[in-house]
C-alpha cells in the first residue's frame, strides 16, 4: 500500500524530548515501511523519522500563541493534503485534518483522536463523512465517544526492542509527564513520601499556567528525597524508568491512553497509579503494577511494587504494546477500508446507465 501519514504540527517526529503522539507516529511510519509499505510522512520541517518526508513543511509550531494555533494546524494540514495526492489512503493524526474540505473527495482517510472526546469535538466528529474512519486509542476513549462512529480500537505500541531493560537497582520511584495537575505530580510526591521511597521526577513545563502550578504546588515539596530533573531526553527517560522500583502514574483525569505506562513496562518497571482512564487496559493489577485510589492505598502499593516480577512487565510490553502489533492492527484496518472501497467502485455496484 501507499500510505500518507500526517503528524501534528507542534513537534518534530520523533520528538527530541517530550511528545506522545509524535512517538506513536514515528513508530507507525517506521513499522509500515519495515512491513513493506510505501510511506510519505507530512511532519514539521526538521523531523528525522527515516521515511520519505513531504518537503517544505513549516517548522514545529509548539509554543505559538493560542490565537494562532488553529491557523498553524490548518496551514500544516493544507500543505500535507496538497502533497499526498498519489497515495491509497491517508492516516491523519491532526484534529483539523478530517474537516479540511479541500482534500480529495475520493481519498479514504483514517483519523486517530489522541485526546479526549470533548463535547465540542464530539459534535464535530459526528459530522465527518463516511470516507473518514475514526480510530480510538482505548476502549475507555471509545466508550466516551458519545455517538462518534468508531471504526477500530487500536492501542498504541512502541519499539520495545529498542528499550533497554532495567533492574530497578536505583531503589527510587520515578515520575514522568507534563507539569499539569491532571498528571498528578503533587500526588506522586505525597505517595512516595508516605511510602518512604525516594522520588525522581521529570516533567516538561510549558506555559505560564504550568509554571505557576510547579512554583506553588510542586517546588515547595522538593528536597533531598524528591528530586526534580526537568525535561530529559528519550535515552535518559528509559534510564530513569529502568532504575526505578516503580513508575508512579497517579493521573487525576480519564486519560485516553497513557504512553508513558507502556514505556515503563518495557523497561521492566511496574506501574503504580490510579485506575482512571485507560490504565486498566494497560496495567494488569497485581501482575504488572497496582491500580489504587487515594494517597494511602497508593503508598501501600508502592511499598509492595518491588515484589512484582519485572520480567512479566517486559513481557506484557512485548506481547501487547509492541510497534509490530500496532502496525499489524492498522494494516488490517487500512486493507478493510480499501477492500470496501473497491467493492463499492466495482462495475457490479455501479448504477445502470
Image (spheres, helix red, strand yellow):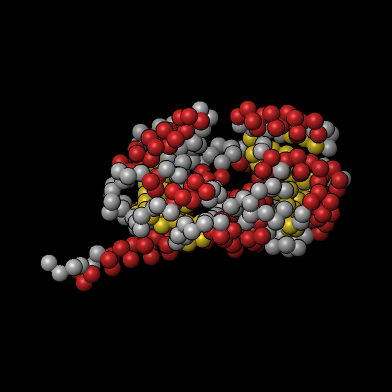
In the picture, residue 342 is in which quadrant? bottom left
Q: Is residue 154 above or below residue 220?
A: below
Q: Quick one: which residue is furthest to the bottom in this view?
A: 348
Q: Is residue 306 visible?
A: no
Nearer to me, 226 or 255: 255
Q: Position of residue 293 (x, y in %)?
A: 77, 54
Q: Position of residue 341 (x, y in %)?
A: 30, 63
> Which of the 4 image quarters holds residue 160?
bottom right
Residue drawn at point x = 18 percent, y = 68 percent = 351
Q: Which is more toward the observer, 281 or 145?
A: 145
**Furthest residue toward left:** 353
Left or right, residue 118 beside residue 284: left
Q: Residue at x 62, y 56 (%)?
A: 278
Which residue is at 15% across, 69% downward? Answer: 352
Position of residue 335 measured from the top left corner of the image (x, y, whole percent): 38, 63
Quadrant of image for the N terminus: bottom left
Would you say 170 lies left or right of 13 here? right
| Residue 143 image-quadrant placement | bottom right
Residue 19 or 239: which is nearer the viewer?
19
The residue shown at (59%, 37%) is 17
Q: Is residue 220 visible?
A: yes
Q: Is residue 205 above or below residue 253?
A: above
Q: What is the x, y in percent for residue 262?
A: 63, 53
* Position of the C terminus by quadrant: bottom left
Amino acid at each position: 500500500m501507499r500510505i500518507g501519514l500526517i503528524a501534528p504540527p507542534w513537534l518534530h517526529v520523533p520528538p527530541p524530548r517530550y511528545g506522545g503522539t509524535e512517538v506513536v507516529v514515528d513508530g507507525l511510519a517506521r513499522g509500515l515501511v519495515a512491513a513493506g509499505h510505501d510511506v510519505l510522512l507530512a511532519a514539521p520541517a526538521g523531523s528525522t523519522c527515516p521515511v520519505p518526508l513531504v518537503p517544505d513543511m513549516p517548522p514545529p509550531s509548539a509554543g505559538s500563541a493560542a490565537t494562532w494555533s488553529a491557523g498553524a494546524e490548518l496551514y500544516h494540514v493544507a500543505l500535507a493534503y496538497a502533497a499526498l495526492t498519489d497515495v491509497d489512503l491517508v492516516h491523519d493524526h491532526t484534529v483539523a485534518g478530517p474537516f479540511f474540505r479541500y482534500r480529495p473527495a475520493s481519498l479514504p482517510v483514517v483519523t486517530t483522536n489522541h485526546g479526549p472526546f470533548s463535547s465540542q469535538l464530539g459534535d464535530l466528529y459526528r459530522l465527518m463523512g463516511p470516507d473518514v474512519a475514526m480510530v480510538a486509542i482505548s476502549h475507555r476513549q471509545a466508550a466516551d465517544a458519545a455517538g462518534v462512529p468508531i471504526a477500530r480500537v487500536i492501542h498504541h505500541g512502541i519499539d520495545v526492542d529498542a528499550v533497554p531493560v532495567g533492574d530497578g537497582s536505583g531503589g527510587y520511584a520515578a515520575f514522568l509527564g507534563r507539569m499539569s495537575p491532571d498528571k498528578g505530580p503533587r500526588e506522586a510526591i505525597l505517595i512516595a513520601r508516605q511510602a518512604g521511597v525516594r522520588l525522581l521526577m521529570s516533567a516538561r513545563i510549558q506555559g505560564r499556567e504550568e509554571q505557576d502550578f510547579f512554583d506553588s504546588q510542586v517546588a515547595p515539596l522538593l528536597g533531598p528525597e524528591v528530586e526534580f530533573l526537568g525535561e530529559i531526553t528519550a535515552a535518559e527517560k528509559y534510564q530513569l524508568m529502568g532504575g526505578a522500583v516503580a513508575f508512579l502514574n497517579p493521573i487525576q483525569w480519564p486519560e485516553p491512553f497513557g504512553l508513558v505506562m507502556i514505556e515503563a513496562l518495557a523497561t521492566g518497571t511496574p506501574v503504580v497509579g490510579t485506575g482512571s482512564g485507560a490504565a486498566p487496559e494497560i496495567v494488569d493489577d497485581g501482575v504488572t503494577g497496582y491500580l489504587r485510589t487515594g494517597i494511602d492505598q497508593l503508598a501501600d502499593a508502592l511499598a509492595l511494587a518491588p515484589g512484582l516480577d519485572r520480567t512479566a512487565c517486559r513481557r506484557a510490553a512485548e506481547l501487547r504494546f509492541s510497534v509490530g502489533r500496532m502496525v499489524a492492527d492498522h494494516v488490517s484496518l487500512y486493507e478493510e477500508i480499501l477492500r470496501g472501497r473497491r467493492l463499492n467502485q466495482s462495475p457490479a455496484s455501479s448504477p445502470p446507465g
